[in-house]
Image (cartoon, rainbow, N blue to C red):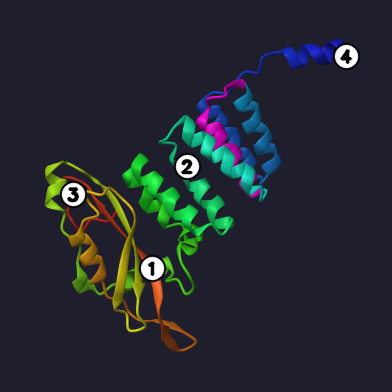
Amino acid sequence: MILAALILQTPQTALGPKDFQAKCAEFSKAKDWKGLEGLARTQIAANPKDAPAETALGFALLAQDRTADARAACEQAIALNPREVTAYLYLGFVCAQSGDRDGVIKTGQRLSGADPFAIKGYYQVPALAAATGTDPKEDFSNDAKDLPSQGWPDYPESARGMKIQGTVVYNLHVRPDGVTTAAEVLAGPPQLATLSLLDFAKRTRFEPLMKDGHPVAFHTTRIYTFRLGAPPDSRF
Protein backbone atom coordinates (compact mmCIF):
# COMPACT_ATOMS: atom_id res chain seq x y z
CA MET A 1 0.00 0.00 0.00
CA ILE A 2 2.81 2.40 0.92
CA LEU A 3 4.64 1.55 -2.33
CA ALA A 4 1.46 2.16 -4.35
CA ALA A 5 0.96 5.51 -2.66
CA LEU A 6 4.52 6.52 -3.44
CA ILE A 7 4.05 5.56 -7.09
CA LEU A 8 0.85 7.60 -7.33
CA GLN A 9 2.57 10.59 -5.79
CA THR A 10 5.54 10.42 -8.17
CA PRO A 11 5.30 13.25 -10.73
CA GLN A 12 4.86 11.95 -14.27
CA THR A 13 7.35 13.16 -16.85
CA ALA A 14 6.18 14.18 -20.31
CA LEU A 15 7.89 12.68 -23.33
CA GLY A 16 9.64 14.99 -25.74
CA PRO A 17 7.74 15.83 -28.95
CA LYS A 18 9.69 13.39 -31.15
CA ASP A 19 9.47 10.53 -28.66
CA PHE A 20 5.76 11.15 -28.16
CA GLN A 21 5.06 11.15 -31.90
CA ALA A 22 7.09 7.97 -32.30
CA LYS A 23 5.08 6.22 -29.58
CA CYS A 24 1.83 7.49 -31.15
CA ALA A 25 2.93 6.01 -34.48
CA GLU A 26 3.62 2.65 -32.82
CA PHE A 27 0.16 2.46 -31.26
CA SER A 28 -1.53 3.67 -34.44
CA LYS A 29 0.30 1.11 -36.60
CA ALA A 30 -0.83 -1.62 -34.22
CA LYS A 31 -4.35 -0.13 -34.13
CA ASP A 32 -4.06 -0.18 -30.35
CA TRP A 33 -6.47 2.66 -29.66
CA LYS A 34 -6.70 1.96 -25.95
CA GLY A 35 -2.92 2.07 -25.75
CA LEU A 36 -2.86 5.36 -27.67
CA GLU A 37 -5.51 6.78 -25.37
CA GLY A 38 -3.48 5.78 -22.32
CA LEU A 39 -0.31 7.32 -23.78
CA ALA A 40 -2.11 10.58 -24.54
CA ARG A 41 -3.71 10.77 -21.10
CA THR A 42 -0.36 10.15 -19.43
CA GLN A 43 1.20 12.92 -21.52
CA ILE A 44 -1.63 15.31 -20.61
CA ALA A 45 -1.33 14.44 -16.93
CA ALA A 46 2.34 15.43 -17.10
CA ASN A 47 1.64 18.57 -19.15
CA PRO A 48 -2.01 19.78 -19.22
CA LYS A 49 -1.13 22.34 -21.92
CA ASP A 50 0.11 19.77 -24.44
CA ALA A 51 -2.04 20.42 -27.53
CA PRO A 52 -0.59 17.53 -29.62
CA ALA A 53 -1.39 15.13 -26.77
CA GLU A 54 -5.01 16.36 -26.72
CA THR A 55 -5.09 15.88 -30.49
CA ALA A 56 -3.80 12.32 -30.14
CA LEU A 57 -6.40 11.69 -27.47
CA GLY A 58 -9.10 12.98 -29.80
CA PHE A 59 -7.96 10.57 -32.52
CA ALA A 60 -7.79 7.62 -30.12
CA LEU A 61 -11.31 8.30 -28.88
CA LEU A 62 -12.62 8.82 -32.42
CA ALA A 63 -11.16 5.44 -33.43
CA GLN A 64 -13.19 3.93 -30.59
CA ASP A 65 -16.40 5.68 -31.79
CA ARG A 66 -16.50 7.80 -28.64
CA THR A 67 -17.42 10.88 -30.62
CA ALA A 68 -18.57 13.13 -27.77
CA ASP A 69 -15.31 12.64 -25.86
CA ALA A 70 -13.29 12.93 -29.08
CA ARG A 71 -14.96 16.27 -29.88
CA ALA A 72 -14.11 17.58 -26.40
CA ALA A 73 -10.45 16.53 -26.75
CA CYS A 74 -10.13 18.15 -30.19
CA GLU A 75 -11.75 21.35 -28.96
CA GLN A 76 -9.33 21.40 -26.03
CA ALA A 77 -6.37 20.97 -28.40
CA ILE A 78 -7.60 23.90 -30.52
CA ALA A 79 -8.16 26.01 -27.41
CA LEU A 80 -4.57 25.35 -26.33
CA ASN A 81 -3.19 26.05 -29.82
CA PRO A 82 -5.53 27.52 -32.48
CA ARG A 83 -3.00 26.49 -35.16
CA GLU A 84 -3.09 22.82 -34.19
CA VAL A 85 -4.20 21.91 -37.72
CA THR A 86 -4.53 18.15 -37.13
CA ALA A 87 -7.04 18.78 -34.35
CA TYR A 88 -9.35 20.51 -36.85
CA LEU A 89 -9.03 17.53 -39.16
CA TYR A 90 -10.04 15.08 -36.44
CA LEU A 91 -12.82 17.41 -35.30
CA GLY A 92 -14.12 17.38 -38.87
CA PHE A 93 -14.09 13.58 -38.82
CA VAL A 94 -16.02 13.65 -35.54
CA CYS A 95 -18.66 15.89 -37.10
CA ALA A 96 -18.83 13.72 -40.23
CA GLN A 97 -19.13 10.55 -38.18
CA SER A 98 -21.92 12.19 -36.17
CA GLY A 99 -23.76 13.30 -39.31
CA ASP A 100 -23.21 16.94 -38.36
CA ARG A 101 -23.04 18.61 -41.80
CA ASP A 102 -22.93 22.14 -40.40
CA GLY A 103 -20.22 21.09 -37.97
CA VAL A 104 -17.99 19.95 -40.83
CA ILE A 105 -18.41 23.26 -42.66
CA LYS A 106 -17.92 25.38 -39.54
CA THR A 107 -14.80 23.44 -38.60
CA GLY A 108 -13.38 24.13 -42.06
CA GLN A 109 -14.20 27.81 -41.68
CA ARG A 110 -12.47 27.93 -38.31
CA LEU A 111 -9.44 26.21 -39.82
CA SER A 112 -9.31 28.75 -42.66
CA GLY A 113 -8.93 31.48 -40.06
CA ALA A 114 -6.12 29.60 -38.32
CA ASP A 115 -4.24 28.49 -41.44
CA PRO A 116 -5.71 29.37 -44.87
CA PHE A 117 -3.44 26.93 -46.70
CA ALA A 118 -4.51 23.98 -44.55
CA ILE A 119 -8.13 23.92 -45.66
CA LYS A 120 -7.37 22.46 -49.09
CA GLY A 121 -6.30 19.13 -47.67
CA TYR A 122 -9.10 19.31 -45.11
CA TYR A 123 -11.85 19.45 -47.70
CA GLN A 124 -10.19 16.88 -49.92
CA VAL A 125 -10.70 14.16 -47.33
CA PRO A 126 -13.59 12.19 -48.89
CA ALA A 127 -15.17 11.26 -45.56
CA LEU A 128 -15.42 14.95 -44.69
CA ALA A 129 -16.48 16.12 -48.13
CA ALA A 130 -19.26 13.55 -48.26
CA ALA A 131 -20.78 15.10 -45.14
CA THR A 132 -21.08 18.55 -46.74
CA GLY A 133 -24.09 17.78 -48.89
CA THR A 134 -26.58 15.26 -50.19
CA ASP A 135 -26.14 12.27 -52.47
CA PRO A 136 -25.01 12.08 -55.20
CA LYS A 137 -21.63 13.65 -54.51
CA GLU A 138 -18.98 13.87 -57.19
CA ASP A 139 -15.99 11.79 -56.16
CA PHE A 140 -12.68 13.65 -55.97
CA SER A 141 -11.28 11.28 -58.58
CA ASN A 142 -13.53 13.11 -61.06
CA ASP A 143 -11.83 16.46 -60.47
CA ALA A 144 -10.20 16.39 -63.92
CA LYS A 145 -13.61 16.55 -65.57
CA ASP A 146 -13.66 20.36 -65.50
CA LEU A 147 -13.54 21.56 -69.09
CA PRO A 148 -9.89 22.59 -69.74
CA SER A 149 -11.03 25.90 -71.29
CA GLN A 150 -12.17 26.97 -67.85
CA GLY A 151 -8.58 27.77 -66.93
CA TRP A 152 -7.79 29.20 -63.51
CA PRO A 153 -9.25 32.27 -61.78
CA ASP A 154 -7.22 35.48 -61.66
CA TYR A 155 -5.65 36.50 -58.37
CA PRO A 156 -8.02 39.15 -56.91
CA GLU A 157 -6.11 42.40 -57.36
CA SER A 158 -7.27 43.90 -54.07
CA ALA A 159 -6.03 40.81 -52.19
CA ARG A 160 -2.74 40.86 -54.07
CA GLY A 161 -2.30 44.52 -53.15
CA MET A 162 -2.81 43.65 -49.47
CA LYS A 163 -0.42 40.66 -49.86
CA ILE A 164 -3.16 38.25 -48.80
CA GLN A 165 -2.66 34.57 -49.64
CA GLY A 166 -4.75 31.53 -48.92
CA THR A 167 -7.20 28.92 -50.13
CA VAL A 168 -10.86 29.39 -50.96
CA VAL A 169 -13.32 26.49 -50.93
CA TYR A 170 -16.65 26.55 -52.79
CA ASN A 171 -19.51 24.09 -52.88
CA LEU A 172 -20.98 23.94 -56.39
CA HIS A 173 -24.43 22.63 -57.33
CA VAL A 174 -24.44 21.13 -60.84
CA ARG A 175 -27.33 20.25 -63.16
CA PRO A 176 -27.48 16.87 -64.96
CA ASP A 177 -26.08 18.54 -68.11
CA GLY A 178 -22.96 19.67 -66.20
CA VAL A 179 -23.94 23.34 -65.86
CA THR A 180 -23.25 24.91 -62.45
CA THR A 181 -26.39 26.52 -61.04
CA ALA A 182 -25.16 27.80 -57.68
CA ALA A 183 -21.98 28.27 -55.67
CA GLU A 184 -21.45 28.95 -51.99
CA VAL A 185 -18.29 29.75 -50.06
CA LEU A 186 -17.42 27.14 -47.43
CA ALA A 187 -14.14 28.62 -46.20
CA GLY A 188 -11.35 31.01 -47.07
CA PRO A 189 -10.09 34.58 -46.53
CA PRO A 190 -12.90 37.01 -47.41
CA GLN A 191 -10.46 39.15 -49.45
CA LEU A 192 -10.01 36.17 -51.78
CA ALA A 193 -13.62 34.92 -51.74
CA THR A 194 -14.73 37.81 -53.97
CA LEU A 195 -17.80 38.11 -56.18
CA SER A 196 -15.61 37.76 -59.28
CA LEU A 197 -14.20 34.47 -58.00
CA LEU A 198 -17.72 33.34 -57.11
CA ASP A 199 -18.84 34.14 -60.67
CA PHE A 200 -15.85 32.20 -61.98
CA ALA A 201 -16.84 29.20 -59.86
CA LYS A 202 -20.40 29.38 -61.19
CA ARG A 203 -19.10 29.29 -64.78
CA THR A 204 -17.29 26.00 -64.18
CA ARG A 205 -18.66 23.26 -66.43
CA PHE A 206 -18.46 19.51 -65.82
CA GLU A 207 -18.92 16.33 -67.73
CA PRO A 208 -22.28 14.82 -66.72
CA LEU A 209 -22.19 12.52 -63.71
CA MET A 210 -23.85 9.25 -64.67
CA LYS A 211 -25.89 7.10 -62.32
CA ASP A 212 -27.55 3.91 -63.58
CA GLY A 213 -26.88 5.09 -67.13
CA HIS A 214 -28.53 8.49 -66.71
CA PRO A 215 -27.03 11.95 -65.98
CA VAL A 216 -27.92 13.24 -62.52
CA ALA A 217 -27.56 16.49 -60.61
CA PHE A 218 -24.73 16.56 -58.09
CA HIS A 219 -22.61 18.85 -55.97
CA THR A 220 -18.86 19.07 -55.66
CA THR A 221 -16.15 21.11 -53.99
CA ARG A 222 -13.86 23.55 -55.83
CA ILE A 223 -10.61 24.57 -54.19
CA TYR A 224 -8.59 27.60 -55.34
CA THR A 225 -5.24 28.33 -53.71
CA PHE A 226 -3.41 31.63 -54.21
CA ARG A 227 0.21 32.29 -53.25
CA LEU A 228 2.08 35.49 -53.96
CA GLY A 229 4.82 34.98 -56.53
CA ALA A 230 3.33 31.71 -57.85
CA PRO A 231 1.64 31.21 -61.24
CA PRO A 232 -2.14 31.74 -61.00
CA ASP A 233 -2.86 28.24 -62.29
CA SER A 234 -0.66 26.46 -59.74
CA ARG A 235 -2.37 23.83 -57.62
CA PHE A 236 -1.05 23.22 -54.12
Residue 143: percent from left, percent from top: 35, 68
**In contact (CB < 8 Å): disc 3 and disc 2:** no
Q: Which residue is mark 1?
A: 220
Residue 48 lies in magenta, yes or no?
Answer: yes
Residue with the mark numbered 2: 86
* Label located before the other in sequence (4 or 3): 4
Q: Residue at x 46, y 57 (%)?
A: 125
The amino acid beneath tag 1 is Thr
Q: Which is in the foreground here, disc 2 or disc 1? A: 1
Q: Which of the two marks, 4 or 3, is nearer to us in this view?
A: 4
**Residue 37 location in percent, x, y?**
66, 37
Q: Which mark is residue 18?
A: none
Give the alpha-carbon distance from disc 3 to disc 2, as whole Å.
26 Å
Amino acid type at mark 4: Met
As displayed, is residue 40 above or below residue 97?
Answer: above
Residue positioned most to the right: 1
The residue type indicated by label 3 comes to: Ala
Q: Is residue 8 left or right of residue 205?
A: right
Earlier residue among tags 1 and 3: 1
Residue 222's place in the image compared with 54, above or below, is: below
Task: Measure the C-alpha gap from mark 4 to mark 3.
Answer: 66 Å
The region drawn magenta spans: 46-63
Frontmost residue, 214 versus 75? 75
Residue drawn 58% across the image and 40% down it: 72
